[in-house]
Image (cartoon, helix red, strand yellow):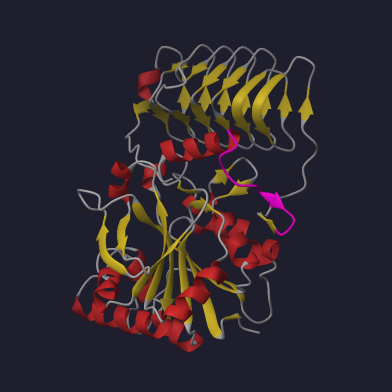
Amino acid sequence: MNTRIAGKKVLAIVLAGGKGSRLAPLTTERAKPAVSFLGTYRLIDFSLSNLVHSGIGDVWVIEQYLPHGLNDHLSGGRPWDLDRTRGGLVVMPPFSSPENEDGEFAQGNAHALAQHVGLMREFAPDVVVVMSADHIYKLDYSDVIREHVRRGASVTMVTTDLEDEAQATRFGNVRADGEGRVTEFAYKPDEPLGKTVTAEVFVYDAAILMDTLDELERQGDLGDYGEELLPALVARGDAHAFGLEGYWMDVGTLDAYMQTHQDFLDGKGFLLDTPDWPFITSSIARPPTRIHGSARLDHAYVCGGAEIRGEVLRSVIGPNAVVEEGASVRDSIVQPGATVRAGASVSRAIVDQGAVVEANAVVGGQSANSRLSVIGAHSVVESGARIGPGLIVEPRQTVRAGREDEVARPAERDSKAGK
């Protein structure tokens, strides 16, 4: 019943435990993999959908930060047909053990893998595929696995080329020779090696991975895999690169999250519902979207259950969200269950789940180049209040006219994003 590709037993591990502080306030009350994308999906849906379409049915999800909402979404793996008697989706929460009765939170993604080496040895895979849960892309992992096995690699790094080389300092940088062998690797260097970076998908020889993790843990703290694990494997001389063609984006920052939505609105993303590779999510049935005669829509995604009476331009409107008559939403994301009241203006902003922008309130800058503003989940921007460009309101706050500076703060910017 176990997954076998190229004659090898395969285990997939999805790293879903990070705090995602650069995506706050969207991650203040939820795990980053559970953040909505295009209203309908969650970020983790892309990794899980790629896995099941690649024929991989043994999937571990390592959790840590605010796992409850994520677990509710995962639904035991049922939406992706991973709720199996043998194998399927297994959630791996933080734990204590006889060796460490107090338990320990992972101090980086390599450390998270090391904590589960004992369980990996019990599972006895030949190949381990490790990926992050917060990247938007389409990839058949079986192609990478076959190439990995053919080359006899210790690790195969899926790579992508950035449009802006300067942004490479946010990722693992890779140089490879004409045969695809990695000759140089630098983790978040001060100066980029070039445009080629890891796409945060790695295929490991399982025995080499586990032995290397054990050895590195004996030597000291592991941290992230770019710090010690990958350099150690590159030093062996048998690390390889596999180029990802097509769209890829790390949505770990607010600006990147917004940019990815705009890319899909502009048709730069990939198709989400092809018969052979649909992206799957766990979602409840919702009524149809209701568009009233007073509505004006152009260049928008509007999800089921939404009600639109106002203006929606170059924006995403989540499920059960409301845009009342006379309200304007431009270049923005209105998340599930949020409301924009009559006469309110939202521009270059994210209005998170369940938040309310009251009548005649203003959120965001009016220019398409304005810095992004964010209203946290279940917050209320009262009538007449103004939240200017580049400001953030944490969840469950009330913003009153003339007292905006009591709860609104400038966003900490990290404009570097993926491809």
In x, y percent, where is residue 163? Answer: 39, 42
Which region shows up in magenta? Answer: 266-276
Q: Is residue 296 left or right of residue 149?
A: right
Nearest the viewer among 399 and 207 is: 207
In x, y percent, where is residue 363? Answer: 49, 20
The image quadrant of residue 45 is: bottom right
**Image point (32%, 77%), residue name:** 238
Nearest the viewer among 314 and 220 is: 314
In x, y percent, where is residue 389? Answer: 40, 21
In x, y percent, where is residue 276? Answer: 72, 59
Residue lying at the far front of the rendered structure: 178
Residue 31 visible within the image: no
Q: Is 268 contained in the magenta span?
A: yes
- Quadrant of the image containing the C terminus: top left
Name the chief secondary structure element in magenta. loop
**Image point (58%, 26%), residue name:** 356
Residue 334 visible within the image: yes
**In the figure, 406 relative to 413: above or below?**
above
